[in-house]
């Protein structure tokens, strides 16, 4: 088994933290996305969509999305559960992951990819080039700010986003709140729940990876 | 248990077909999204993000995303399995669902929402208005056309997208290939695998719903 990671990107970190929370030790290979290694023939043979993370299983299967890697990991190594214990929790956490992805990850990625000089013609991740759309960067910043307001409410007075246990929802929200700083979207003084929860998450060993 | 559906929209259809394939009979309530019923106070109490589908469970919990509804349904009614039987299939199908969502659903939704007159100021789904971005509609059409080429390869000579059993990946790809016609993105003569697979899927009783 091999985990193709990239230390500079948020999506592989979602799997990296997940692996660490499971207490697993998986051989990890760094993909240098700043040098464009994800577009090499060798990497395209693993994942023609040229995205990280990729998890290659012992049977030769390549899992090429965060969702795919984590679904396999959860089914293979159920403890500790990170995607829900009961049917109700599985539904709740799948809800949270989608809401964080659509309102947080997508907004922040759009804000950055459509404005950074280093991302010229890389308006969206994947093998094909698309020009930047400045209005999309602007919309992403507006949506990203609203995401923090929503997250503040979602967390409320809970210890973790889904309730009483740490889950993949905490991983994803933590990573995208961290990543949002690159787009100058940061929790403000009113986001007291986010600040408390963020500091507690940042203190976990898995967050240092 | 209640299923809040909307016959005109693709996302609730993803849950509607899933429920039908499971052979379940769940009380269904139509939400008139053309009349803006999703923005009513009554609906916001179910789902503050104002999206369909919503599945309300007997314990009062509201599942408010396609992923959440289907994760709960799969865990509660495992037969027939639609999200994978083994860990390897669960990983594979989660991969496929993400790839279809990101490259198909997102592209086609962006093409339509950012160009249709009826969607003015509704550039993205949710409770907040955002102006349309014509360049995003254009990018969506280009990405949607590429999605069909990718789907042609993904299907290959398989009976179903994930291999030998019908899964949620078939549901989602079928719904978005159907929906893409509104954006004038349609399989061409070269898409022979899509045509064969599409016709077989369209003949399933669940596809008539």
Image: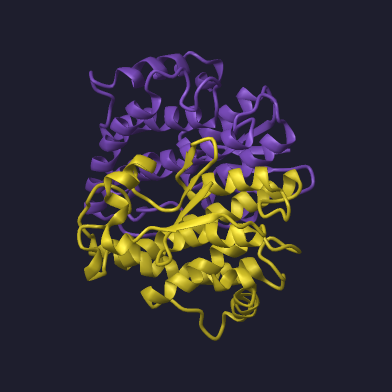
Chain colours: A yellow, B purple
* A33 shown above or below B196: below
Residue A174 location (% of width, % of height): 55, 69
At a point 66% along the width and 43% down the height, the residue shown is: A76
**Residue lying farthest to the bottom in this orientation:** A189
Residue B141 location (% of width, % of height): 25, 41
Q: In this image, A158 relative to B15: left or right?
A: right
**Image quadrant where one finds the N terminus of chain B:** top right
At a point 27% along the width and 37% down the height, the residue shown is: B146
Q: In this image, A207 relative to B79: left or right?
A: left
- Which of B181/A42 is in front? A42
- Which of B208/B97 is in front? B97
Q: Is residue A68 visible?
A: yes
At a point 47% along the width and 69% down the height, the residue shown is: A146
Residue A207 location (% of width, % of height): 58, 71
* B33 shown above or below A182: above
Residue B57 location (% of width, % of height): 74, 43
Q: Quadrant of residue B31?
A: top right
- Which of A128/B135 is in front? A128
At a point 75% along the width and 49% down the height, the residue shown is: A85
* A190 shown above or below A60: below
Number of dots carrying numbers: 0
Q: Quadrant of residue B28?
A: top right
Q: Is residue A139 visible?
A: no
């Amino acid at each position: 088994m091999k985990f193709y990671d990239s230390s500079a990107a948020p999506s592989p970190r979602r799997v990296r933290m997940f692996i660490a929370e499971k207490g697993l030790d998986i051989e990890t290979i760094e993909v240098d996305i700043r040098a464009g290694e994800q577009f090499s023939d060798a990497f395209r043979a693993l994942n023609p969509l040229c995205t990280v993370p990729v998890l290659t299983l012992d049977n030769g299967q390549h899992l090429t999305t965060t969702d795919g890697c984590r679904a396999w990991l959860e089914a293979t190594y159920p403890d500790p559960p990170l995607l829900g214990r009961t049917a109700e929790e599985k539904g709740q956490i799948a809800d949270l992951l989608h809401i964080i992805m659509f309102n947080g990850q997508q907004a922040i990625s759009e804000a950055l990819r459509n404005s950074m000089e280093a991302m010229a013609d890389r308006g969206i991740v994947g093998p094909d080039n698309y020009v930047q759309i400045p209005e999309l960067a602007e919309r992403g910043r507006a949506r990203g700010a609203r995401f923090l307001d929503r997250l503040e409410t979602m967390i409320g007075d809970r210890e973790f986003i889904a309730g009483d246990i740490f889950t993949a929802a905490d991983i994803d929200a933590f990573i995208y709140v961290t990543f949002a700083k690159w787009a100058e979207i940061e929790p403000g003084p009113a986001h007291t729940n986010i600040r408390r929860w963020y500091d507690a998450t940042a203190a976990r060993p898995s967050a240092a990876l």
